Amino acid sequence: MTMKAYEITEIAGQWVAGKRVNHGDVIHLTDAQAKYELMRGLIRPAGAAASAASEASKERRSRRPR
């Protein structure tokens, strides 16, 4: 299993993916473990991947028809 680093967002509570966390902490999860937490916005990819993912997300939102 490949583990990836994720940063805890400001909207997360004290528990994410069964782990006690604080805002800004970095946790390592598999894709399957991270899927639900990502959808809820409780985590985001950490480091350089976070910047790329954030920019891609912003671009997708700006292209959506309204």
Image (cartoon, grey):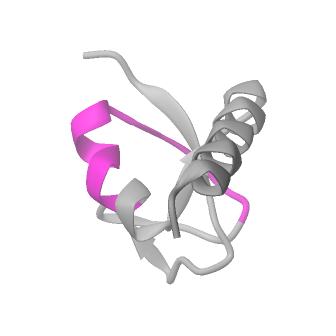
Q: Please tell me which residue is depicted at 48% across the width and 27% down the height of the picture.
A: 4
Give how far across and how far down residue 3 sits, in percent: 40, 24
Number of numbered markers:
0
Which residue is at a point 29% across and 64% down the rendered structure image? 18
Q: Identify the residue at horizontal 69%, vertical 50% (top origin).
A: 58
Q: Is residue 33 left or right of residue 66?
A: left
Out of 60 and 53, give the one closest to the viewer.
60
Residue furthest top as drawn: 1
For the N terminus, which image quadrant?
top left
Please say if 46 is above or below 42.
above
Residue 25 is one of the magenta-drawn residues:
yes
Q: Identify the residue shown where x is 41% and y is 74%.
A: 15
Question: Residue 17 versus residue 64: which sits nearer the camera?
Answer: 64
Residue 2 appears left or right of 7: left
Q: Quadrant of residue 39?
A: bottom left
Q: Is residue 4 magenta?
A: no
Q: Is residue 17 left or right of residue 50?
A: left
Q: Point out the stretch of residues depicted in magenta.
A: 24-37
From the top left corner, tell me how far across and down residue 26 is, in percent: 63, 47
Res 53 quadrant in image: top right
User: Residue 64: percent from the left, percent from the top?
Assistant: 53, 56
